[in-house]
Image (cartoon, rainbow, N blue to C red):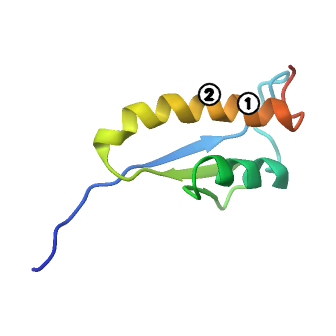
Amino acid sequence: MGGDFTFGIEEEYFLVDAETKLVARRMPEAFLVAAQAATNGRVSGEFLQSQIEVASSTPEELGLRMRTDAEKWGGIIRSIGIAPQ
């Protein structure tokens, strides 16, 4: 077999209502657009409307990226009015 293989990780997240703690019924388009822009296109929607997938490039980058992405999610959610400020 030719070529090098890499190992990638996919993260799955659900959008949850901050007040009721229930899974959202759908993903606001504004959130998905902002999340894709903030992560250089690593975010995609999933079959379930309230779920997103984030693709990682390498395990070495995963720890740092998970911390920075978590901060981005909070900012995006607050900026489009999904969660309380």
Graded by Cα atoms within 10 Å as few (under 14), some (14 to 19) or many (20 or more), the crowding at tag 1 reads some
Q: Is residue 34 above or below residue 61?
A: below
According to the picture, the residue beneath numbered tag 2 turns out to be 71
Depth order, front residue of 37/66: 37
Q: Residue at x 64, y 34 (%)?
A: 72
Real-space Cα distance between discs 2 and 1?
Answer: 6 Å
Residue 81 lies left or right of residue 55; in this view the side is right
> Quadrant of the rendered structure where residue 41 is?
bottom right
- The secondary element bearing badge 2 is classed as helix
Residue 4 lies left or right of residue 82; in this view the side is left
Residue 43 lies left or right of residue 85; in this view the side is left
Q: Residue at x 15, y 75 (%)?
A: 3
**Image x and y of residue 14, in percent:** 66, 41
According to the picture, the residue beneath numbered tag 1 turns out to be 75
Q: Is residue 78 above or below residue 35?
A: above
Residue 28 appears in the rendering: no
The image quadrant where one finds the C terminus is: top right
